[in-house]
C-alpha cells in the first residue's frame, strides 16, 4: 500500500512474520541491492527516514527498507525513548529484520545488507550473527548485549562506526568499540571498526531537528567531515558486498 502523503518518497508496506504484522517504509530503485535501515531508540522518526533516503541515493542506488520495530510508537524525549527501548523484545526485533531481509530478496534485491544507528546499530550486528540471509552489515554506534548475540559468530562482513567522545558505556563508547573489534577479529570475516576523533554519540544526525535534539542532550559536536567520511566508507562497504 502506498504512503498517501504526497511529499513522502516512501512506499508504506505491511510485512508478516509468525503471528504479527508490521509496517515498513521502502524507498529507492526497484531492482537495486536492498538495505534494511534500523531505527534509533526514538523509533521510526524523521532522522531514520532521512538516513534511508540518503542511502537509497548513494552510488548507483540502493533499495532501503525501514521496519517499524516499535509498531508505530515514537519517543519524543530521551525518557520516552529509553522506555520504548527497554520494552523492546530484541529477539522479536531480529525476527522482524529477518522478515524484512526476506521481503527485499523476494522483491528484486539479489543481495541485502543491514544498517542501523544506536539501538539499530546493535541490532544490525545481532542480525549479522543470527540472520543467515544478511550479506553485509554496517553498524553505527551500538553493540548488542552478549545475551543477544556474540559478534565473534558473525557470518557477514561488518563495518562499524563510533564517536571517540561517545559516553554510552559498554554500548557505544570506545571500550565497546575495541571489544567489538577483538570479537570481529576472532570471527575471521572481513571487518572494519572506525573511531571518529572529536565526535560523540549519534554524530550522523545532521538534520536541523536532529542537531537541535542532540544539543538538548548535551551533544554539541559538529563535524561534517566525519559524517561525509563515514557515508563514503558505508557506500564502499555496501557496494563491495552487495554487488551481485
Image (cartoon, rainbow, N blue to C red):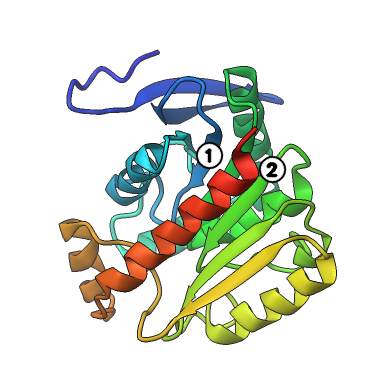
Q: Which residue lies furthest to the top in this view?
A: 1
The crowd level at tag 1 (other Cα within 10 Å; few <14, some 14-19, many 20+) is many
Find residue 35 and name its label: 1
In the foreground, 75 or 226: 226
Q: Would you say residue 85 is visible in this rendering? A: no
In the foreground, 222 or 66: 222
Q: Which of marks 2 and 1 is nearer the N terminus?
A: 1
Q: Can you say whether 142 is above or below 76 in the image?
A: below
Give the secondary structure at mark 2: loop
Find residue 95 and name its label: none
- Residue at x-position 73% and y-position 51%: 156
- Residue at x-position 64% and y-position 27%: 110
In the foreground, 125 or 138: 138
Image location (x, y in percent) of residue 195: 50, 79
Q: Would you say residue 90 is visible in this rendering? A: yes
| Residue 19 position by quadrant | top right
| 4 left or right of 95 in image | left
Image location (x, y in percent) of residue 44: 39, 44
Cα separation, mark 2 vs mark 1, equals 10 Å
The crowd level at tag 2 (other Cα within 10 Å; few <14, some 14-19, many 20+) is many
Q: Can you say whether 192 is above or below 167 in the image?
A: above
| 231 left or right of 141 in image | left
| 177 left or right of 41 in image | right
Give the secondary structure at mark 1: strand
Image location (x, y in percent) of residue 57: 35, 38
Q: Can you say whether 91 is above or below 98 in the image?
A: below
Find residue 135 and name its label: 2
> The C terminus lies in which quarter of the figure?
top right
| 90 left or right of 215 in image | right
- Residue at x-position 35% and y-position 15%: 2
| Residue 212 position by quadrant | bottom left
Amino acid at each position: 500500500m502506498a504512503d498517501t502523503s504526497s511529499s513522502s518518497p516512501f512506499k508504506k508496506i505491511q510485512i508478516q512474520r509468525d503471528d504479527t504484522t508490521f509496517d515498513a517504509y521502502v524507498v529507492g530503485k526497484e531492482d537495486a541491492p536492498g538495505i534494511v535501515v534500523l531505527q534509533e531508540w526514538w523509533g521510526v522518526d524523521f532522522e531514520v527516514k532521512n538516513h534511508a533516503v540518503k542511502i537509497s541515493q548513494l552510488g548507483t542506488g540502493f533499495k532501503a527498507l525501514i521496519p517499524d520495530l516499535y509498531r508505530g510508537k515514537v519517543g519524543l524525549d530521551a525518557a520516552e525513548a529509553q522506555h520504548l527501548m527497554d520494552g523492546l523484545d530484541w529477539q522479536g526485533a531480529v525476527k522482524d529484520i529477518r522478515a524484512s531481509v526476506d521481503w527485499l530478496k523476494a522483491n528484486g534485491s539479489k543481495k541485502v545488507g543491514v544498517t542501523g544507528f544506536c539501538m539499530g546499530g546493535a541490532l544490525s550486528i545481532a542480525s549479522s550473527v543470527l540472520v543467515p540471509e544478511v550479506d553485509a552489515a554496517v553498524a553505527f554506534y551500538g553493540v548488542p548485549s552478549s545475551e543477544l548475540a556474540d559478534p565473534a559468530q558473525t557470518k557477514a562482513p561488518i563495518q562499524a562506526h563510533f564517536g571517540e567522545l561517545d559516553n554510552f558505556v559498554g554500548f557505544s563508547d570506545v571500550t565497546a568499540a575495541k571489544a567489538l573489534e577483538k570479537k570481529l577479529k576472532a570471527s575471521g570475516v572481513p571487518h572494519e571498526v572506525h573511531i571518529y576523533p572529536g565526535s560523540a554519540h549519534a554524530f550522523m544526525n545532521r538534520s536541523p531537528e536532529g542537531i537541535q535534539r542532540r544539543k538538548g542532550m548535551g551533544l554539541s559536536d559538529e563535524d561534517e567531515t566525519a559524517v561525509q567520511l563515514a557515508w563514503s566508507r558505508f557506500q564502499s562497504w555496501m557496494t563491495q558486498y552487495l554487488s551481485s
